[in-house]
């Protein structure tokens, strides 16, 4: 029988991601025990009610005592303060990690507060849903999703591998890259899409010619696909944009140029340019489905209710007889 | 026993929408028989193989003979030519319709070719998936989706109501509006989202710093939500943008202003403005789920595979004993 990968996991922050880690770590048995804390008393109470941890404590400083794995599951902007609070209380040999969507700023903000006797392995599980809070999590959230680790060069390779084993145990696939490259990759695959979605949903809500109820009513034409990600946690996303400013602005520049080009094609009635572009983008969708990062079911497997039946006769039966 | 709503349905074009109408009309028994045609011999052959129609013919002119409901299910740009071809062959009292995503241009292009003895009721079912062709259709596609009718003022109200009854019989909810208002509503709920999605997917594919395989790999961070609509049929979408140019350019102007505003907030580090915007957009998502136009399941109900089990012990069982 294998031993748990870590004896005691301390979760600082228990929202969608933190509570999913708790559920997954527990149901796979990959840690011995879980201690959790959250800033708000309501969240702590809810975590206790849901039974997500063996122990719920009031402060991060208290939570990390005796823990050999500490994961900060708080918005990116709060990670520096968490590191400052826990730094003096960390056990020698403990692994300190996070789940932030930005990595260079995390390294910059957390590393200075961590003592030399701990292992610092920043992490970013590329998974999530449009829901937030401790109730929103589920144990399968990370299955078949990527978790990116961005250890500083000084981090012990064995510590990185041990954290990688933890993520694999709860279903994720692990990739290692530099914080700077991570921030560029995520700027295009996640941060820019969110910014665009937030923008267009806001635009639709402010139109004079089209009412909000019309926008909702006819959203199946494409708009609703943007609303899911524009419903993501506002605090988390504010921090992402404030902490990955350069990469996001760079991608935004390229996007705006490309949008101008397509706008020009529409204005000039250049059907050939539009057709060529629309054909190229189709291949990318195919690639995502092939590598298992999305469902091939039409409408992302959204349920389609049954057809109304019985209201009308079935003339075919008569025709065929 | 109620009689079918129409005796003979002629489908001109049998892609995703046409083949879904065929399947739905047949399985609800809302028409007596179906005749279908398509421009390409391969599509006609496939329609016959799938048994989607009672009869498959080579030309639109032939298809409409004796039909009392004719639905052109071809790209918007082809509707004028279809009307010109079928005009001389239409039976008196027949209803002529379409399924185009643009309506003012359809009225402009089709109406002049139709004889006064038929009823012209343009229609747009706001439903679809990222797949195309006769194999992609399914009978439930229109259930709980809206179908917008945009009859010209001269159209007989009874004819409009009869077509509305047909769409309701195959599961849709019906709304009536002017072609011009339709084009504005769809510009924001469908056309602009598609244009933005096509743009960002193209941008991601051209980056020097991030490889295509990285984009695919980490697409679960938000990007994949854009790829579905950027995988839609290129011919159809080229025609939409060419035929709803003014409304799309107008919405695009507003969107670009809003994007500049958010970009400025990021550049200046204005967290408050970002937070305020991101909070507002969340409410819209809630509205769409409430009125049943999307699934509330996390990730749009995308399947989450099971957790890996058995690889590790379950220490909790031991702890609790």
Image: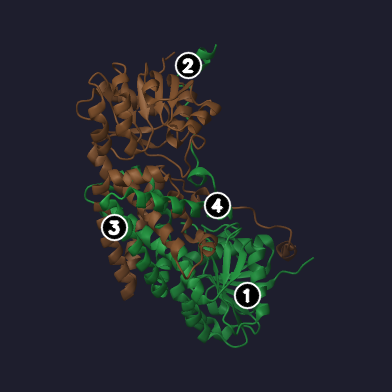
Chain colours: A green, B brown
Q: Quarter of the image containing the N terminus of chain B?
A: top left
Kindly check if marks 3 and 2 are in contact, taking CB atoms under 8 A apart as contact: no
Nearer to me, B304 or B80:
B80
Where residue A206 appears, as percent x and y from the top left, is: 26, 54
Q: Does the CB distance between marks 3 and 1 fall below 8 Å?
A: no
To the question of a shared chain for discs 4 and 2, the answer is: yes
Q: Kindly state the secondary structure of the residue where label 1 is placed.
A: strand
Give the class, few, some or many, for how many residues have Cα within 10 Å of label 3's Cα (few <14, many ≥20). Answer: many
Q: Earlier in the sequence, mark 4 or mark 2?
A: 4
Discs 4, 2 touching: Cβ within 8 Å: no
Image depth: mark 4 or mark 2 in front: 4
Q: Chain of mark 3?
A: B
Label 2: state its secondary structure. Answer: helix
Marks 1 and 4 sit apart, C-alpha to C-alpha, by: 34 Å
Residue B211: percent from left, percent from top: 51, 66
Q: Which residue is mark 3?
A: B255
Residue farthest toward the right in the current orientation of the protein = A1
Q: Position of residue A222 (x, y in %)?
A: 39, 47
Secondary element under disc 4, as helix, strand or loop, is: helix
Work out whether mark 2 precedes mark 1 in sequence or the reverse, and give the earlier one: 1
List the residue tagged with mark 1.
Answer: A69
Q: Alpha-carbon distance for marks 2 and 1?
A: 68 Å
Question: Residue A195, how many percent across, how many down?
Answer: 38, 63
* 1 or 4: mark nearer the eye: 4
Quadrant that contains the C terminus of chain B: bottom right
Q: Residue at x 37, y 33 (%)?
A: B173
User: What separation in Å lies between label 3 and label 2 (alpha carbons)?
Assistant: 50 Å
Q: Residues within 10 Å of mark 2 (few under 14, many from 20)?
A: many
Kindly identify which chain the residue marked by label 1 belongs to: A
| Label 3 residue SS | helix
């Amino acid at each position: 029988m294998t031993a748990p990968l870590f004896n005691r996991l301390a979760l600082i922050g228990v929202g969608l991601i933190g509570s999913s880690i708790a559920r997954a770590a527990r149901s796979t048995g990959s840690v011995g025990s879980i201690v959790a804390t959250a800033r708000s008393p309501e969240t702590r109470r809810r975590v206790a009610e849901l039974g997500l941890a063996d122990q719920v404590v009031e402060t991060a400083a208290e939570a990390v005592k005796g823990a050999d794995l500490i994961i900060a599951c708080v918005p990116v902007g709060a990670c520096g303060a968490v590191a400052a609070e826990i730094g003096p209380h960390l056990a020698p040999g403990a692994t300190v990690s996070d789940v932030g969507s930005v990595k260079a700023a995390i390294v910059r903000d957390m590393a200075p507060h961590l003592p030399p006797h701990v292992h610092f392995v920043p992490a970013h599980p590329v998974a999530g849903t449009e829901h937030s809070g401790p109730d929103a999590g589920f144990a399968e959230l990370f299955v078949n999703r990527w978790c990116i680790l961005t250890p500083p060069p000084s981090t012990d390779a064995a510590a990185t591998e041990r954290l990688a084993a933890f993520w694999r145990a709860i279903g994720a696939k692990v990739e290692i890259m530099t914080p700077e490259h991570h921030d560029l990759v995520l700027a295009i695959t996640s941060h820019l899409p969110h910014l665009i979605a937030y923008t267009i949903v806001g635009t639709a809500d402010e139109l004079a010619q089209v009412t909000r109820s019309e926008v909702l009513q006819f959203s199946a034409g494409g708009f609703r696909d943007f609303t899911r990600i524009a419903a993501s946690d506002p605090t988390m996303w504010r921090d992402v944009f404030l902490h990955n400013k350069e990469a996001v602005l760079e991608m935004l520049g390229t996007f705006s140029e490309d949008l101008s080009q397509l706008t020009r094609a529409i204005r000039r009635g250049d059907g050939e340019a539009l057709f060529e572009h629309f054909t190229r983008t189709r291949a990318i969708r195919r690639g995502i489905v092939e590598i298992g990062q999305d469902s091939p079911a039409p409408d992302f497997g959204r349920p389609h209710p049954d057809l109304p039946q019985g209201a009308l006769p079935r003339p075919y039966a008569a025709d065929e007889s």
